[in-house]
């Protein structure tokens, strides 16, 4: 949970906002109108002053994150979007924020084939702690909902080959009103998380301000390094500063954080997913260079398997999160997930594209007037991913193009359809083809030059027959 690119609130406004957020969810930020790019254009082209002095003494080199983690985007499960701040364990024991919920999700990851695909993090979000620190000034879990303690929960996950993530907030309170991490508590909280065996920290930014965040986020980096335990570090800092330069320094973020929330929280709706897609790709010239192994833009959770997306829209989220090299944190109920959602989230081709070791974030190539958009991501071994996305809401659209028109070099290419899970007909760069894209849906391809192409076990599927039209120069896919 992070507030997103909105102006900072006064304390009184924050108090009102906290009540509104716990009861429902905040409104999404206003979306910037997308920039239209034609095919022709594409082809042609001081809250605690006592510690301020210490913080300012740290150089960038001194606070560089040194954990060697998350060389590919992290994958796992995160509680917030689906379970929010449900603390009513008396009346809703199966769904409240408690150790039982996280044990249940850990069991599902370990037993239902998720762990083997890379989904290894089980991440606690807000509302886990007691309202008071202990006598030593340390954070402590709610004793009724986490009677075994966080260290015991971490051992439960580690015994199953999983990792535990936890939530904190760089401010006087978390977004849900629980104890925050003030500047004088950063070292204490970092060491507490390390002592518990935590593997990842998400540090939010409610109840703070720009100056406080500028000091605190690098200071937490230094504190995590000092624990000696590798702890992945997710920073919500840019989301609180509008997500873009000059207020956001992505070079610095890449030095001190493993991933960062750039934008507002996702909600369980197609409008929310589309809002995020538009913001990230409208600003791709800034965001794309910032990403790479160990440093990722985070467009927020996967809501596949919840209530707000159709089957096609779920494929769209999975495909475009893979193209963005985004962290894949599901926020759903793995205990009741249906087979169609499971098939999308466990799609080996989409995961392989997301986890490509080069770690280069993809881009939007074209935004057509007919409602079709084309996205591309370079992959290892001279391969690439292509996604054809339809913004239309009327009927499937037959989109005609060629690889040459998409700036592929001269050659013959092998195509693998990621969601059909089958190889497609070989294409020359000049061969025109037609893809049929469902409304709000995608067609996603893995593309590789034929002479060097071989589909790995992650991508391999049964052969598909070729279908040529009468002209012989167009292939219908």
Image (cartoon, helix red, strand yellow):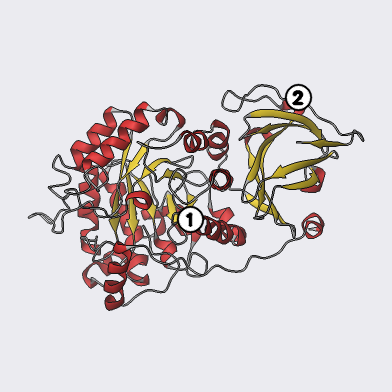
Label count reads: 2
In which quadrant is the N terminus drawn?
A: bottom left
Q: Is residue 307 visible?
A: yes
Label 1: which residue? 269
Q: Is residue 345 above or below residue 83?
A: above
Q: How packed is label 1: few (under 14 Cα within 10 Å), some, or many (20 or more)?
A: some
- What residue appears at the point 24 percent right and 60 percent down from the top-left corner? 181
Disc 1 is placed on an element classified as loop
Label 2: which residue? 465
Q: How packed is label 2: few (under 14 Cα within 10 Å), some, or many (20 or more)?
A: few
> Left of 327 or right of it: where is 448?
right
In which quadrant is the C terminus drawn?
A: top right
Q: Who is closer to the viewer here, 213 or 4?
A: 4
Q: Is residue 37 above or below residue 99?
A: below
Disc 2 is placed on an element classified as loop
Going by the picture, which residue comes out furthest to the right? 471
Q: Who is closer to the viewer here, 215 or 114?
A: 114
Quadrant in which residue 209 is drawn: bottom left
Q: Position of residue 64 (x, y in %)?
A: 40, 52
Q: Is residue 316 above or below residue 161?
A: below
Quadrant in which residue 102 is drawn: top left
Sooner in the amino-acid sequence: mark 1 or mark 2: 1
Q: Is residue 213 above or below residue 9?
A: above
Going by the picture, which residue comes out furthest to the front? 394
């Amino acid at each position: 949970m992070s507030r997103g690119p909105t102006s900072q609130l006064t304390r009184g406004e924050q108090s009102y906002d906290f009540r509104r957020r716990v009861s429902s969810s905040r409104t999404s930020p206003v979306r910037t109108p997308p920039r239209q790019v034609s095919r022709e254009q594409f082809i042609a082209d001081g809250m605690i002053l006592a510690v301020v002095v210490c913080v300012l003494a740290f150089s960038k080199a001194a606070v560089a994150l040194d954990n060697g983690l998350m060389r590919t985007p992290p994958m796992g499960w995160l509680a917030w979007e689906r379970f929010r701040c449900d603390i009513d364990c008396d009346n809703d024991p199966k769904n409240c924020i408690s150790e039982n919920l996280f044990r249940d999700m850990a069991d599902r990851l370990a037993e239902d084939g998720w762990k083997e695909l890379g989904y290894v993090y089980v991440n606690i979000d807000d509302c886990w702690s007691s309202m008071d620190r202990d006598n030593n000034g340390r954070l402590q879990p709610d004793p009724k909902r986490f009677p075994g303690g966080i260290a015991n929960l971490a051992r439960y996950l580690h015994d199953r080959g999983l990792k535990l993530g936890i939530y904190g907030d760089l401010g006087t309170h978390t977004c849900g009103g629980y104890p925050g991490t003030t500047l004088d508590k950063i070292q204490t909280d970092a060491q507490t998380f390390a002592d518990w065996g935590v593997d990842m920290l998400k540090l939010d930014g409610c109840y703070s301000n720009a100056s406080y965040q500028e000091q605190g986020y690098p200071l937490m980096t230094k504190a995590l390094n000092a624990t000696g335990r590798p702890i992945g570090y997710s920073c919500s800092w840019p989301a609180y500063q509008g997500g873009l330069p000059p207020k956001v320094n992505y070079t610095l973020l890449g030095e001190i954080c493993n991933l960062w929330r750039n934008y507002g929280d996702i909600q369980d709706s197609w409008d929310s997913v589309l809002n995020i897609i538009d913001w990230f790709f409208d600003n791709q010239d800034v965001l794309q260079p910032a990403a790479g192994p160990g440093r990722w833009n985070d467009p927020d959770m996967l809501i596949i398997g919840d209530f707000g997306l159709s089957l096609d829209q779920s494929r769209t989220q999975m495909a475009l999160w893979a193209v963005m090299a985004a962290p894949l944190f599901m926020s759903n109920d793995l205990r009741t997930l249906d087979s169609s959602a499971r098939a999308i989230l466990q799609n080996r081709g989409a995961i392989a594209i997301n986890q490509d070791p080069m770690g280069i974030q993809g881009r939007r190539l074209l935004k057509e007037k007919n409602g079709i958009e084309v996205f591309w991501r370079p992959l290892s071994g001279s391969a690439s991913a292509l996604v054809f996305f339809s913004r239309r809401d009327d009927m499937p659209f037959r989109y005609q193009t060629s690889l040459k028109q998409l700036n592929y070099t001269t050659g013959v290419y092998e195509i693998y359809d990621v969601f059909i899970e089958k190889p497609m007909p070989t294409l020359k760069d000049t061969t025109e083809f037609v893809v049929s894209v469902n409304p709000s849906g995608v067609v996603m391809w893995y593309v590789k030059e034929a002479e060097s192409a071989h589909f790995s076990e992650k991508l391999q599927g049964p052969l598909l027959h070729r279908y040529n039209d009468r002209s012989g120069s167009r292939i219908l896919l």
